Image: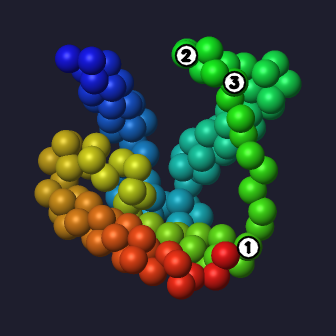
Amino acid sequence: MKNLKYLVLGVLFGIILTKSEVISWWRIQEMFRFQAFHMYGVIGSAILVGMISIQLIKRNHLKTINGEEIKLADKKYNHGTWIGGTIFGLGWALTGACPGPLFAQLGSGVASAAVLILAALAGTWTYSALRERLPM
């Protein structure tokens, strides 16, 4: 019962993703073909909200619900970032699905999302198996 709030939030988030059409294969293809601004607007808004939120957290020394200070460590750039980003983007373009909304796609009746969920899990497992041998 204590995790019920997370289930409710997840369902609400899935509904928002579905209603805003960001889980739509057609919308994702429009984005990668530069045919519509819809997805760029959604992603750009998310980046802007994230930037503002991080600045508010840092400047106001905000705390978690439990009263602990939120610490955001600086991240060092490495070449694996753009390589991984390129692989991620290619997978996104080819499948028409980002890992985030896969469960919303499955819940909205896109049965092929199950295959993509399994592929995402296989990719995650592969990364964890190879992580120690990858460049930092």
Question: What residue type is disc 1 on?
Answer: Asn
Residue holding disc 3: 69
**Residue found 50% across the figure and 70% down from its top:** 88
| Classed neighbour count for the residue bearing mark 3: other residues with Cα under 10 Å, few (<14), some (14–19), many (≥20) | few
Q: Secondary structure at mark 1?
A: loop
> Along the horizontal axis of the image, is 57 left or right of 105?
right
Residue holding disc 2: 66
Q: Quadrant of residue 58?
A: top right
Which residue extends farthest right? 59
Label whose residue precedes the other's in the sequence (1 or 2): 2
Depth check: 19 or 103 in front? 103
Report, in whole angstroms, how far the alpha carbon at label 1 lies from the one at label 2. 34 Å
Q: Which label belongs to residue 133?
A: none
**Residue found 38% across the figure and 67% down from its top:** 124
Dot in front, 1 or 3? 3
Q: Are marks 1 and 2 in contact (CB under 8 Å)?
A: no
Q: Quadrant of residue 16?
A: top left
Report, in whole angstroms, how far the alpha carbon at label 1 lies from the one at label 3. 28 Å
Q: Quadrant of the N terminus?
A: top left
Specify how the rendered protein is coloured: rainbow
**Residue found 23% across the figure and 66% down from its top:** 118
Q: Position of residue 10 (x, y in %)?
A: 33, 31
Depth check: 42 or 116 in front? 116
Total numbered labels placed on residues in the image: 3
Question: What residue type is disc 2 on?
Answer: Asn
Q: Quadrant of the C terminus?
A: bottom right
Q: Is residue 86 visible?
A: no
Q: Position of residue 33 (x, y in %)?
A: 53, 69
Dot in front, 1 or 2? 2
Residue holding disc 1: 78
Q: Secondary structure at mark 3?
A: loop
